[in-house]
Image (tube, rainbow, N blue to C red):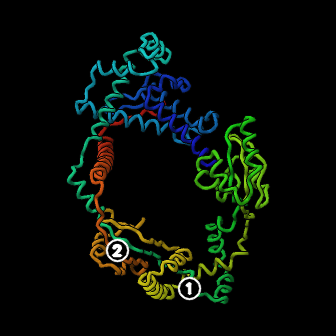
């Protein structure tokens, strides 16, 4: 079901992209936004951004958002709040910048190229042949002369040629071979990182200290503020853990199929039957598991049944816009709402623990020594328990290569990486400081074999080129934008 929701989103996004790539202005209905007058919306180094271009792009964008919102049109207030107009202007200005840059680079377009491009557009074909009358009629319907349209197509071709400049090979194979060698030099480690403040829950606090803290009037606002910051923890909605089997369609055949499954399914075999029978793609891999969800996450008809069932029960067939479902409710969590007064003691304890600087400093030292011993003795289970208990980052059997020099999401400094790669197996390194425990144990060092060097080289070269191309383009556009004389005309927007 989750995939089905994602599919709807993907449909609208793909449609939008398709409209941009092709000559979508033919169908955009730009006349919805009448600006009046003959002024341009903006100029970029003297090149105009015309009202027609702006209207077309704006109408297309508004239509897209309207579809996303169920077909309901957007009000002017919504258009303003969503910043659609400014987004359109920014995009059009960027187009003009690249167009001017292409012209300055000598990327001229011949009339033959323009004609060839137009003749290949499906919109102007009948029986796979270019139809001049269809071409003229469609242009006239949308208020374009052939000259104006040819200019648009020419700009589009020029833009493509400009983009192609950034897709050429910018990185040598020797460079990529060096990158591969670095990437194939790997150290396997266990790593753990814990901040000083994360150790606060381990600091001892007496009942008398808590009572004294709560009794002080000046602490009332601090307690209330802390409670509000953690409101989601203390106010949790009702949740259901469920599995489902989906049969797509709303006809008799789909109903007969779901009834047949209902006749043979039970609590024990639900997951295995779901993996075989469900037509929800994600459900085939996990036995129809939907995990925990609260109200508002599923479609109303599905939710109504799921929240109405008792734990361990399987529903009758439920019809939704996706088809027919069988729902197994595995567990339920009642809504939980804890008042400030009911958690005041807990909050006071946490706040006091964070203020005990000397205790935290001592705890940091003792815990660092204890964790170092756990790493040396390879007691992974105890380290995983510690990770759950505290806000710790623990990486088990993590591979660190000499190129990326990172452990999971943690980036090593050049000095730390150098020390790590020269350390023998079994060494525990301390990369922490006064406010952090950061210990890394070297499990093994490996030089990976390049069994598929050519494929690796090809993929790596492509990846490096794409990355460098993207950065080069971003820097060029930034420079063009800073250098260009851009004048906008807010009065016509």
**SS for dot 1:** loop
Residue at 43% x, 79% y: name it. 437
The quadrant in which residue 336 appears is bottom right
- The image position of residue 141, as x and y in percent, is 50, 15
Q: Quadrant of residue 104?
A: top left
Q: Is residue 477 above or below residue 386?
A: above
The 10 Å Cα crowd at callout 1, few under 14, some 14 to 19, many 20 or more, is some
Residue found 30% across the figure and 79% down from its top: 424
The residue beneath circle 2 is 444
- Which residue, as the protein is rendered here, is positioned at the far top? 133
Q: Position of residue 404 (x, y in %)?
A: 33, 62
x 47%, y 85%: residue = 367
Q: Is residue 402 visible in this depiction of the protein?
A: no
Q: Secondary structure at mark 2?
A: strand
Based on the displayed image, in which of its 4 quarters is residue 411 positioned?
bottom left
Residue situated in front as seen by the camera: 454 or 17: 454
Is disc 2 in contact with disc 1, using a CB cutoff of under 8 Å?
no
> In this orientation, which residue lies closer to the viewer: 14 or 103?
14
Q: Residue 484: x percent and y percent?
A: 31, 38
Residue hosting label 1:
203
Name the disc covering residue 159, or none. Answer: none
- How crowded is the residue under tag 2: few (<14 C-alpha within 10 Å), some, or many (20+)? some
Q: Is residue 108 among what the camera can see?
A: yes
Task: Reply above or below: 422 against 274.
Answer: below
Q: Residue at x 33, y 78 (%)?
A: 425
Q: Nearer the viewer, mark 2 or mark 1?
A: 2
Judging depth in this view, the residue of 250 and 360 nearest the camera is: 250
Q: Label 2, label 1: how many angstroms apart (C-alpha)?
A: 36 Å
**First-in-chain label (2 vs 1):** 1
């Amino acid at each position: 079901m989750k995939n089905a929701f994602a599919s709807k989103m993907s449909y609208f996004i793909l449609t939008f992209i398709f409209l941009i790539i092709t000559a979508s202005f033919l169908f955009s209905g730009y006349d919805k936004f009448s600006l009046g007058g003959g002024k341009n919306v903006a100029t970029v180094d003297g090149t105009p951004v015309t009202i027609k271009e702006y209207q077309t792009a704006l109408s297309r964008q508004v239509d897209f958002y309207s579809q996303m919102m169920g077909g309901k049109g957007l009000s002017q207030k919504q258009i303003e709040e969503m910043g659609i107009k400014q987004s359109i202007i920014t995009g059009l200005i960027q187009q003009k910048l690249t167009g001017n840059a292409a012209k300055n680079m000598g990327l001229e377009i011949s009339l033959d190229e323009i004609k060839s491009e137009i003749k290949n557009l499906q919109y102007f074909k009948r029986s796979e042949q270019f139809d001049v009358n269809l071409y003229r009629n469609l242009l006239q319907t949308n208020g374009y002369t052939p000259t104006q349209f040819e200019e648009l197509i020419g700009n589009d071709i020029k833009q493509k040629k400009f983009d192609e400049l950034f897709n050429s090979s910018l990185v040598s194979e020797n460079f990529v071979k060096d990158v591969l060698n670095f990437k194939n030099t790997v150290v396997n480690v266990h790593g753990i990182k814990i901040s000083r403040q994360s150790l606060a829950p381990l600091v001892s606090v007496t009942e008398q200290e808590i009572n004294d803290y709560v009794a002080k009037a000046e602490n009332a606002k601090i307690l209330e503020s802390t409670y509000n910051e953690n409101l989601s923890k203390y106010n949790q909605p009702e949740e259901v853990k469920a599995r489902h089997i989906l049969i797509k369609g709303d006809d008799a055949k789909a109903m007969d199929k779901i009834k047949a499954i209902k006749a043979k399914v039970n609590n024990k075999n639900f997951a295995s039957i779901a993996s075989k029978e469900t037509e929800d793609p994600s459900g085939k891999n996990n036995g129809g598991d939907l995990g925990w969800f609260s109200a508002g996450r599923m479609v109303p008809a599905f939710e109504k049944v799921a929240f109405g069932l008792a734990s361990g029960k399987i529903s009758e067939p439920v019809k939704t816009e996706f088809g027919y479902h069988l729902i197994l409710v595995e567990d339920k969590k009642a809504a939980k709402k804890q008042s400030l007064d009911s958690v005041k003691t807990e909050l006071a304890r946490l706040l006091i623990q964070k203020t005990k600087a000397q205790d935290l400093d001592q705890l940091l030292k003792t815990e660092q020594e204890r964790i170092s011993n756990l790493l040396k003795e390879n007691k992974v289970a105890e380290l995983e328990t510690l990770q759950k208990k505290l806000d710790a980052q623990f990486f088990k059997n993590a591979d660190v290569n000499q190129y990326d020099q990172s452990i999971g999401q943690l980036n090593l400094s050049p000095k730390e990486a150098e020390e790590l790669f020269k350390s023998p197996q079994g060494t525990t390194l301390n990369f922490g400081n006064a406010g952090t425990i950061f210990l890394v144990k070297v499990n093994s060092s490996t030089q990976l074999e390049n069994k598929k060097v050519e494929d690796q080289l090809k993929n790596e070269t492509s990846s490096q080129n794409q990355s460098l191309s993207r950065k080069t383009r971003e820097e060029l556009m930034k420079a063009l934008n800073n250098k260009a004389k851009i004048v906008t005309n807010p009065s016509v927007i």
